[in-house]
Image: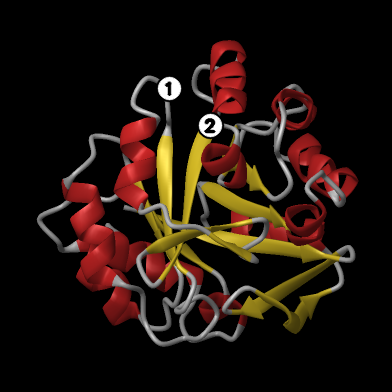
Amino acid sequence: MLVIPAIDIKSGKCVRLKEGKMDQETIFSEDPLGMARQWFAKGAEILHVVDLDGAIQGKPINYEIILKIASEFQHKTIQVGGGIRNLESASLYLDSGISRVVMGTSAVKEPEILHKVSSVYPDGIVLALDVYDGKLKTEGWVEESAITPLDLINSLSDIKISAIIYTDISKDGMMSGPNVKATLELARKTIVPVIASGGVSSLDHIRELSNSSVELEGIICGRSLYEKAFTLEEAILEAQ
């Protein structure tokens, strides 16, 4: 299981939010590129980068910083989410060294866009399932829907999806532990590789997911790494 450091960018800075609320941010670095260098130097194989401003505004905003990261680390895996709502936005990243784009809002509201992206970039889509109380949220976790994760996955069965990120919004940034039960239940019900996200705060959480009989592709770690609950090196060892 891969340990995937998160770099969330807001106003050009590396931040973490609580429960996805834009007014509850903690700034951890003024230099997202510097953070990418640090995580790769410490052994990361993949980075999860989110354009938080883009997620709210519905279009890439911090893309220049993100493309600088891609340019410097051309042989590393970088997945990017936030405001990717059409083929043009996806192409902006996928034609510039980003390995795959994370799409959630479009999957719920305009799935035909995923068809278009998948047809041009067959391995380029990661599906974001941002869940609150069992239902998906969109538009940067602002808008509610009545759709369940499995509803969405089943509706997209004809689209090539490289991975699924399952995030329990109520856990995100709260350091209270991931929703292990829901994550593993989802992984059992789909053949698409699943990445756990939200709330990781101890090596025990990583160990629990890694030792499960259900294999996960990875686990995204954000605040826990920035607040030094554990080191990336320690997390990687636990996930092996």
Q: Which residue is mark 2?
A: 125
Q: Considering only order in the chain, which callout, 1 or 2, is on the residue closer to the N terminus?
A: 2
Residue drawn where x is 28% and y is 61% of the image = 183
Residue 6 pos. (x, y %): 59, 62
Q: Residue furthest top?
A: 119
For image coordinates 74% across by 74% down, the residue present is 15
Left-right relation of 107 to 219: right
Q: Quadrant of residue 17?
A: bottom right
Q: Is residue 78 above or below residue 237?
A: above
Marker disc for residue 159:
1
Q: Mark 2 near mark 1, Cβ–Cβ under 8 Å? A: yes
Q: CA distance from mark 2 to mark 1?
A: 9 Å
Does residue 179 show up?
yes
Q: As displayed, is residue 41 above or below residue 134?
A: above
For the residue pair 16 and 229, the one nearer the viewer reads as 16
Q: Where in the figure is residue 22, as x and y percent of width and height?
A: 74, 76
| Secondary structure beneath label 2 | strand
Q: Position of residue 88 (x, y in %)?
A: 78, 25
The amino acid on which the numbered mark 1 sits, given as a three-letter code, is Ile
Mark 2 nearby-residue class (10 Å; few <14, some 14–19, many ≥20): many
Residue located 33% across and 65% down the image: 237
Q: Percent position (x, y) of residue 177?
A: 36, 81
Find residue 5 and report its image quarter.
Answer: bottom right
Q: Secondary structure at mark 1?
A: loop
Query: Which amino acid type corresponds to the residue marked 2 in the rendered image?
Result: Ile
For the C terminus, the image quarter is bottom left
- Residue 174 shows which numbered tag? none
Q: Residues within 10 Å of mark 1 (few under 14, many from 20)?
A: some
Which residue is the extreme one toward the left? 213
